């Protein structure tokens, strides 16, 4: 967790498990941690190993976070499945997402990275 000018940000980079039950438990724990933390903003980023937007993870985290569109990130050489996500709280701050599909990104990992545009205007101090 980071804080600047009285604004706190909690950011977590994640890689959830492969079993649906394990992911559901992990999502519940993430929801509990984030909703109990007195941060102004929360970002969850990473490989959620979720194929469906109707999964237990999506339903649980969707109660608290904005969710990126499900964009194909896996496998990186010919992506067909969107396993990677960016979740943002409070809602309404996530502006856009895109997949970085450069040749370097395709070689760097078996997943392509997501790039998210997040409205940070409310995080900035007012001008003096």
Image (cartoon, rainbow, N blue to C red):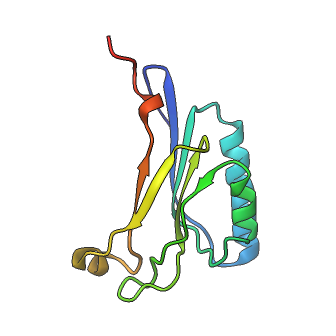
Give the residue drawn at x 61%, y 52%: 66
The outermost residue toward the left is 104
- Looking at this view, is 10 or 77 the one in front? 77
The x, y position of residue 107, in whole percent, is 27, 81
Q: Is residue 75 left or right of residue 57?
A: left
Q: Tally the numbered discs.
A: 0
Q: Is residue 42 left or right of residue 101?
A: right
- Looking at this view, is 107 or 55 the one in front? 55
The x, y position of residue 23, in whole percent, is 69, 69
Tell me: residue 110, above or below residue 15. Answer: below
The outermost residue toward the bottom is 78
The x, y position of residue 118, in whole percent, is 44, 46
Give the quarter of the image for residue 105.
bottom left
Q: Quadrant of the C terminus?
A: top left
Give the residue drawn at x 67%, y 52%: 30
Tell me: residue 37, above or below residue 48. Answer: above
Tell me: residue 119, above or below residue 102. Answer: above
The x, y position of residue 113, in whole percent, is 38, 68
Give the residue drawn at x 35%, y 87%: 77
Give the quarter of the image for residue 83.
bottom right
């Amino acid at each position: 967790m980071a804080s600047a000018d009285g604004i706190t940000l909690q950011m977590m980079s994640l890689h959830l498990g492969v079993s649906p039950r394990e992911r559901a438990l992990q999502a519940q724990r993430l929801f509990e941690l984030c909703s109990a933390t007195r941060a102004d903003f929360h970002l969850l980023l990473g490989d959620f190993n979720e194929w469906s937007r109707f999964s237990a993870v999506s339903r649980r985290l969707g109660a608290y976070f904005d969710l990126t569109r499900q964009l194909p990130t896996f496998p990186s050489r010919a992506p067909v499945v969107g396993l990677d996500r960016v979740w943002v709280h409070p809602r309404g701050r996530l502006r856009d997402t895109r997949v970085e599909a450069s040749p370097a990104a395709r070689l760097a990992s078996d997943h392509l990275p997501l790039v998210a545009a997040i409205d940070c205007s409310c995080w900035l101090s007012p001008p003096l």
